[in-house]
């Protein structure tokens, strides 16, 4: 039986770390990488809230293999270049496990580094299929894929018998990926795609886009991207009297879209993970968040909690902090989490994950439609 150089190096490093832990306070570092600043920091707030609660509760219950979990938090701004810097910093911090990153465009380059350095990563939010298409051993998720979410959105739009649909995206890995999945689903159902067009992330003036949408006489607009841009598009479309129903993915399902769009957010359709915070079995956990004045309803709060939990349970079941042994355990095991039973396929993707269509309201509340 042979061991790869990479696995051997990881095993030696783990042994050294364990010897050092015996001489000092025993701890297991969990890196948490996501946006603390920047235009989508609101989603990072969800990620850090979920991971902090999981680490706190696991430590209160004795830790993992008798060792305390310690968070190493870093801000990647959801920027690919900064994500690479953060990944290298995680290596320098001696981290073996990471919850993150959040944006697919950041997760992709960071995961290259983690795989090379023998660090296990669980992203609670990145949905691009490309991330797990490379056959990496140490990359996992606690959320579904664009090719799961896109068909849910496409099927719903098709069920409404639209006449002409526009599909717009922000030209980013996440936004264009989910938009493409929706477009392809609609095409398969014989729905006319009047436009498939990209906008520039960070732009403020979408008057030319709104004009094109009106000229194309569309009755549905699907947007792939994040809430800052869609909020402005909604507001400007309302001002231009564009009569169309808008829809987007979980990247727009943020209460801050109401601040940007105002009343124009009413009736927006959004695909999101199920409201895990409303499940009876999560009441005690939800109460713990609320006791801290935190909102557990965001789409990435409990997926982030689950990411920490599967790492901790994987270590316990493997009886080891070696990332490769933990990865093998994750692929062969079953884990009970606030998002349900987690089981992985060979790629590190969830065997199943549900997305729900919601109608968004101008007060930030939402109503499930499927």
Image (cartoon, grey):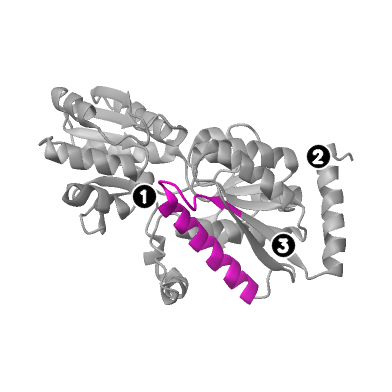
What is the secondary structure assignment of the residue under circle 3?
A: strand
Q: Main secondary structure of the magenta part?
A: helix
In the picture, the disc for residue 6 is 2
Q: Relative to 86, say whether 167 is above or below.
A: above
What is the secondary structure assignment of the residue under circle 1?
A: strand
Of residue 208 and residue 272, the one placed in the foreground of this image is 208
Mark 1 neighbour density, 10 Å: few (under 14) some (14–19) many (20 or more): many
Determine which quarter of the picture holds residue 248.
Answer: top left
Mark 1 vs 2, N-terminal side: 2
Q: Quadrant of the N terminus?
A: top right
Can residue 4 be seen?
A: no
Give me the C-alpha separation between circle 1 and circle 2. 38 Å
Is residue 26 shown left or right of residue 157? right
Disc nearest the viewer among 2 and 3: 3
Q: List the residue tagged with mark 3.
A: 28
Whole-percent x, y for residue 308 in the image: 59, 59
- Say whether marks 1 and 2 touch (CB < 8 Å): no
Mark 3 neighbour density, 10 Å: few (under 14) some (14–19) many (20 or more): many
Mark 2 neighbour density, 10 Å: few (under 14) some (14–19) many (20 or more): some
Give me the C-alpha separation between circle 2 and circle 3. 21 Å
Whole-percent x, y for residue 188 in the image: 32, 25
Residue 77 painted magenta: no
Question: What span is in magenta?
Answer: 32-60
Mark 2 vs 3, N-terminal side: 2
Q: List the residue tagged with mark 1.
A: 272
Whole-percent x, y for residue 201 in the image: 37, 34
């Amino acid at each position: 039986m042979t061991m790869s150089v990479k696995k051997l190096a990881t095993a030696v490093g783990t042994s050294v770390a364990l010897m050092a832990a015996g001489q000092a306070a025993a701890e297991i570092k969990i890196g948490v990488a996501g946006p603390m600043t920047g235009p989508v920091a609101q989603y990072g707030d969800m990620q850090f809230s979920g991971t902090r609660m999981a680490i706190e509760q696991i430590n209160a219950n004795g830790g993992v293999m008798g060792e305390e979990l310690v968070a190493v938090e870093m801000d990647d701004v959801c920027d690919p270049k900064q994500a690479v810097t953060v990944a290298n910093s995680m290596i320098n911090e001696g981290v073996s496990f990471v919850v993150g990153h959040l944006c697919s465009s950041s997760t992709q380059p960071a995961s290259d580094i983690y795989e090379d350095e023998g660090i296990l990563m669980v992203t609670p939010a990145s949905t691009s299929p490309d991330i797990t298409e490379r056959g990496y051993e140490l990359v996992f998720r606690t959320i579904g894929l664009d090719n799961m979410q896109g068909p849910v959105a496409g099927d719903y739009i098709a069920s409404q018998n639209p006449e002409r649909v526009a599909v717009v995206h922000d030209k980013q890995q996440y936004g264009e990926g989910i938009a493409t999945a929706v477009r392809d689903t609609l095409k398969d159902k014989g729905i006319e795609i009047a436009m498939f067009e990209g906008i520039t992330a960070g732009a403020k003036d979408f008057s030319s886009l709104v004009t094109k949408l009106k000229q194309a006489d569309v009755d549905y607009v699907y947007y792939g991207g994040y809430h800052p841009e869609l909020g402005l598009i909604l507001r400007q479309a309302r001002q231009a009297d564009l009569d169309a129903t808008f829809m987007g993915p979980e990247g727009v399902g943020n209460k801050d879209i109401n601040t940007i769009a105002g009343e124009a957010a009413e009736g927006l359709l959004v695909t999101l993970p199920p409201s895990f915070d409303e499940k009876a079995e999560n009441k005690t956990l939800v109460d713990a968040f609320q006791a801290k004045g935190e909102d557990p309803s965001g789409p990435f709060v409990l997926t982030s909690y689950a990411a920490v939990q599967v790492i901790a349970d994987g270590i316990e079941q493997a009886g080891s902090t070696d990332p490769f042994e933990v990865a093998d355990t994750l692929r062969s095991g079953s884990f009970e989490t606030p998002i349900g039973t987690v089981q992985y396929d060979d790629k590190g993707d969830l065997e199943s994950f549900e997305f729900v269509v919601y109608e968004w309201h101008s007060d930030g509340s939402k109503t499930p439609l499927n």
